[in-house]
Image: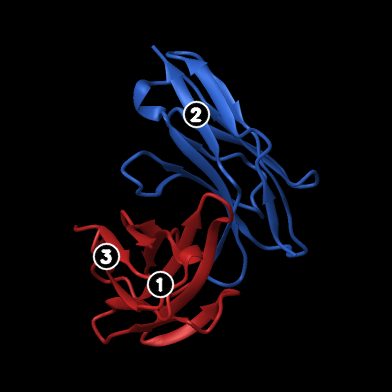
Amino acid sequence: KAGVTQTPRYLIKTRGQQVTLSCSPISGHRSVSWYQQTPGQGLQFLFEYFSETQRNKGNFPGRFSGRQFSNSRSEMNVSTLELGDSALYLCASSPGISYNSPLHFGNGTRLTVT
Amino acid sequence: AQTVTQSQPEMSVQEAETVTLSCTYDTSESDYYLFWYKQPPSRQMILVIRQEAYKQQNATENRFSVNFQKAAKSFSLKISDSQLGDAAMYFCAFQTGANNLFFGTGTRLTVIP
């Protein structure tokens, strides 16, 4: 079974631009979560989608948004990029039926904002 | 507030020896799950071991085991017979009713040949 796939692996953007990251979950998984990892703040939860609906949201500004498609693939968008948005963005999937299934992570997208 | 504390930023262990990584957490929830994840240079977070808070028996997964002390809110990871491939960042995390994880700041483990 293929794992969680995130594209692209690396991204360089300029302040003020917007960016879209993509995540394909493990086949059959309906929940997709996004995390931001930075040296200063560590790993922080962004949001979770289940069956195309945002089910849970972390404490991030509205510039961070996401969506999930009917095939469970998810995209995360960041608008008006700031230098502080430079981070590793990790996507994780789980079956999602119960809240206690372990999360399976992808290799992440490294975003650099200049 | 939900918090996870890993007080050891770095640890090292000789190959084939045993090492214990510490983790404490704070939550007002009574039902939760605890995890240890490892993150090698490949960046992928890999699940090492999982513990249900309602279970008194400590979880074990091959060379990895935990010491779960619910009253003390402590959840340490023991790695036995350490191997070079165990070198990575290790994150302690817990999960409550919602499907999101609260992570600690991580412990970088170095394995010395």
Q: Report the chain holding disc 2.
A: B
Residue B4 in the figure: left or right of residue A61: right
Q: Position of residue B86 (x, y in %)?
A: 40, 29
Q: Which residue sits furthest left?
A: A1
**Residue depicted at x 58% and y 56%:** A41
Q: CA distance from mark 1 to mark 3?
A: 33 Å
SS at circle 2: strand
SS at circle 3: loop
In the image, B26 versus B65, the foreground residue is B26
Q: Position of residue A40 (x, y in %)?
A: 58, 52
In the image, B21 versus A36, the foreground residue is A36
Which one is closest to the eye, mark 2 or mark 3? 2
**Residue depicted at x 37% and y 64%:** A91
The tag on residue A83 is none
Residue B39, picture quadrant:
top left
Which one is closest to the eye, mark 1 or mark 3? 1
Residue A25 in the figure: left or right of residue A53: left
Type of amino acid at the residue the image marks with label 2: Leu
From this view, report whether residue A26 is shown above or below residue B64.
below
The tag on residue B109 is 2
From this view, report whether residue B69 is shown above or below residue A7.
above
Q: Which of the chains is red?
A: A
Residue A99 is at least partly visible in this image: no
Q: CA distance from mark 2 to mark 3?
A: 29 Å
Q: Which of the chains is blue?
A: B
